[in-house]
Amino acid sequence: MTSNTEFQAWRVEDHDGDFQGAEQTLNTADLPEGDVLIRVSHSSLNYKDALSASGSKAVTRKFPHTPGIDAAGEVVESATGTPAVGSQVIVTGYDLGMNTDGGFGEYIRVPADWCVTMPDGWDARTAMIYGTAGLTAGLCVQKLLTMGAKPEQGRVAVSGASGAVGTVAVEILSNLGFEVVAISGKADKAADLKELGAAEVLGRDALAEEKKPLLKPVFANAIDTVGGTPLAELLKQILPGGSVSICGLVAGAQLNTTVMPFILRGINLLGVDSVEIPLADKAAVWHKLSGDWKCAKTEASARDIARKELDSALKAFLKGESAGKIVLDHAKA
Ligand SMILES: NC(=O)c1ccc[n+]([C@@H]2O[C@H](COP(=O)([O-])OP(=O)(O)OC[C@H]3O[C@@H](n4cnc5c(N)ncnc54)[C@H](OP(=O)(O)O)[C@@H]3O)[C@@H](O)[C@H]2O)c1
């Protein structure tokens, strides 16, 4: 019977402050309460998973714990009937992988309203190439489009461009016909960013701190994944009526700015949350990613790993040495 099935999970234990992850055999009966039991075939690797695995209490309070904020697979039990048994679903965000056992296990049990039905013609592995980072990039693009962003208005900047969110943002915007300016601290990634569709790649000095409240406006719109000083400087360079979608804080959570770009140029600052938004909003972007917004180059460059490779892959994330999209394939030996 499925509700009493043994499965493998990469589980993190707290040994007096030393957090160690390893494969363990668990039972579906031990999973938390929930409407839907899902056999997870694939998960995705995110920085948040690395934080959870290293014991960050901001992400995970209780151990032992199975990380994995993203999961995709087949519904095997459904108390609500929707999603139906046998259907393929995507689960990202909410509490998955934080304090609810996540996608690094072969099974998860979650509320029905965490499950997005897999878009037609798509599969779990492809969805997990995008994962939360791809979903977030899509949400950032969607917010710009909702504000009326159009290619003919001018160049669109993407900061933190070589990151997981940034690369997908560059590829989607380029596919939609925007002239994308990638802003990246990694000179050695310039060729890759151009390959993804960036028309130009600028170094981080393009967003270095200036005293003036306004600078020459050179970008019609922007996606900022880094926050802090670079975001404050980006706001000063947006053309009148333009918009900036923001999602991240790697360069700082503090935003020191003036009202000048807002009241003299009428620009818009658009916050993006991929975690707690309504399921329908996530589903709309997943459908775009599986259709018009497909990122063929990102998909082609993804790398699959097995559970036994998680430890080193997550440590690389923490050291900032991770590159490209990594998919956890539970069937990989
Ligand atoms: N709001 C949401 O729902 C949501 C969802 C997912 C992620 N996020 C957040 O979005 C941000 C980006 O996520 P990600 O997955 O793309 O992370 P990532 O893969 O680590 O990429 C972040 C990129 O930011 C740049 N960067 C790193 N440190 C920097 C610094 N000190 N100053 C300026 N730039 C720096 C780097 O790009 P370059 O070397 O190319 O400059 C790096 O590749 C993170 O803060 C993450 O927490 C938010």
Image (spheres, rainbow, N blue to C red):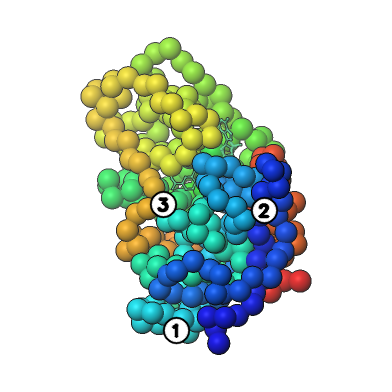
The amino acid on which the numbered mark 2 sits, given as a three-letter code, is Glu
> Tag 1's secondary structure?
loop
Crowd rating for badge 3 (residues with CA inside 10 Å; few <14, some 14–19, many 20+) = many
**Quarter in which the N terminus is drawn:** bottom right
1 or 2: mark nearer the eye: 2
User: Mark 3 or mark 2, which has the lower sequence index?
Assistant: 2
Ligand 1 position by quadrant: top right
> Tag 3's secondary structure?
loop
Q: Label 3 belongs to which residue?
A: 274
User: Are the residues tagged 3 and 2 within 8 Å (C-beta)?
Assistant: no
Q: Label 2 belongs to which residue?
A: 13
Q: Residue 144: percent from the left, percent from the top?
A: 34, 46
Mark 3 C-beta closer than 8 Å to ligand 1: yes
**Number of numbered tags placed on the structure image:** 3
Image-based side of 269 in relation to 326, left or right: left
| Label disc, if present, on residue 85 of the rendered structure | 1
Residue shown at the point (53%, 30%) measured from the top left: 251
User: Are the residues tagged 1 and 2 within 8 Å (C-beta)?
Assistant: no
> Tag 2's secondary structure?
strand
Residue shown at the point (27%, 47%) measured from the top left: 148
- The residue most toward the top is 211
User: Are the residues tagged 1 and 3 within 8 Å (C-beta)?
Assistant: no
- CA gap, disc 1 and disc 3: 26 Å
Q: Residue 132: percent from the left, percent from the top?
A: 50, 55
The amino acid on which the numbered mark 3 sits, given as a three-letter code, is Ser
- CA gap, disc 1 and disc 2: 32 Å
Seen from the viewer's position, the closer of residues 193 and 261 is: 261
Seen from the viewer's position, the closer of residues 179 and 227 is: 227
